[in-house]
Amino acid sequence: MSPAAATSTTAGTAPVGPVSAVGAVPVTMAGALNRALADSLAADERVVVFGEDVGALGGVFRITDGLAARFGDQRVFDTPLAEAGIVGTAIGMAMNGLVPVVEMQFDAFAYPAFEQVTSHLAKLRNRTRGKLALPVVIRVPFGGGIGGVEHHSDSSEAYYTHTPGLRVVTPGSPADAYRLLRQAILCPDPVVFLEPKRRYWAKETATLTADGPAIDRAVVRRPGRDVTLIAYGGTVATALEAAAAAVEEDWDVEVIDLRSLSPLDEQTLVSSVRRTGRAVIVHEAAGFGGFGAEVAARLTEQCFHYLEAPILRVTGLDIPYPPPHLEKYHLPTADRILDAIARLQWEDGDAQGAQGAQGARETQGARGEGDA
């Protein structure tokens, strides 16, 4: 595990009612998030939900639809268009025993609140030597794929993961959206909850339960033996699409859904890459200085002698977010992922070198060097 400075290691210390679970039902990610908020509000009277248009309107994406009518305007309410005020108010509420869940209407709308997030929300536990916890969840619809213009399609995860003291998580499926949001609200640490808005209307048949992988664990969504494909949020579905198509090229692709960006589950990643010897990282954000660069660096440090080829990244372009009619060229696609996999030195004509790399992996494994 990578460190998330000044955060606790265990989530779920708040007194809550029993976890709500129902049988498998068709559900969208938007519906799963709505259910998670409703169940959290019902389970713990300290939970409050607020932000721009989250009350009567139910949010721009209707994630909070019906919650104000059910729980009242003392627990689900609208705020002025003032993101710094929203987060600052949430900090004060958390300091006095409440559990605020706030919504930033769009990813880039959160930037005015950045000083509150980085200077206070992320640092108060450390500043008070652990005496003061801030159980605040900041919900941020992020990423592109909906035909939005700039300030409506940013992938801003690297700003938050670079800030010690914050947890940063993002779901890739409806069931995991429910699970991660319930876990985030139970967590005594501040959590930036990034919701891939392009997947709000993706549907699956799933059982909605908070049980399952811990909030800080990655999950193997598709096992494979030839290459590790690492994705999170909106790119998980894209990675799975690429992995299915890769079968035609006789590549057996393992897909890992990070779920938690900070802290990062290095153990799951390292175990996979040491076994496959190849890795590709996918995200919508610009490549330069992107979160994938940190993942690649850590994997290189811990898997260097196991690698058959350099670790590659498939990312958004290093440009401001493009106009809607051009975003299809900016966002990672299954074809771009397959092109990257094809560049992983499958046929370099150096059979002896390949055998040497395989031998190095076996030797390193036998010695137990550099275990995660």
Image: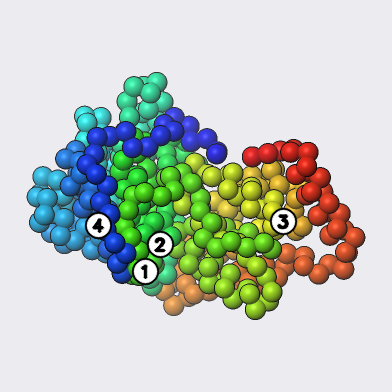
Residue at screen point 77% across, 65% down: 345
Please tell me which residue lies in front, 119 or 367: 367
Disc 3 marks which residue?
A: 277
Q: Give the labeled residue for mark 1.
A: 204
Q: Amino acid at mark 4?
A: Arg
| Residue drawn where x is 36% and y is 59% of the image | 175
First in residue order: circle 1 vs circle 3? 1
Residue position marked by numbered label 2 in the rendering: 173
* C-alpha span from label 2 to label 4: 14 Å
| Colour option used | rainbow
Image location (x, y in percent) of residue 29: 33, 63
The residue that appears at 36% across and 49% down in the rendered structure is 211
Q: Residue furthest front?
A: 23
Q: For the residues marked 2 and 3, what is the alpha-carbon distance in whole angstroms? A: 27 Å
Residue 282 seen by the camera? no
Task: Give the position of the N terminus as an image quadrant.
Answer: top right
Identified at 70% across, 70% down, the residue is 342
Q: Are marks 2 and 4 in contact (CB under 8 Å)?
A: no
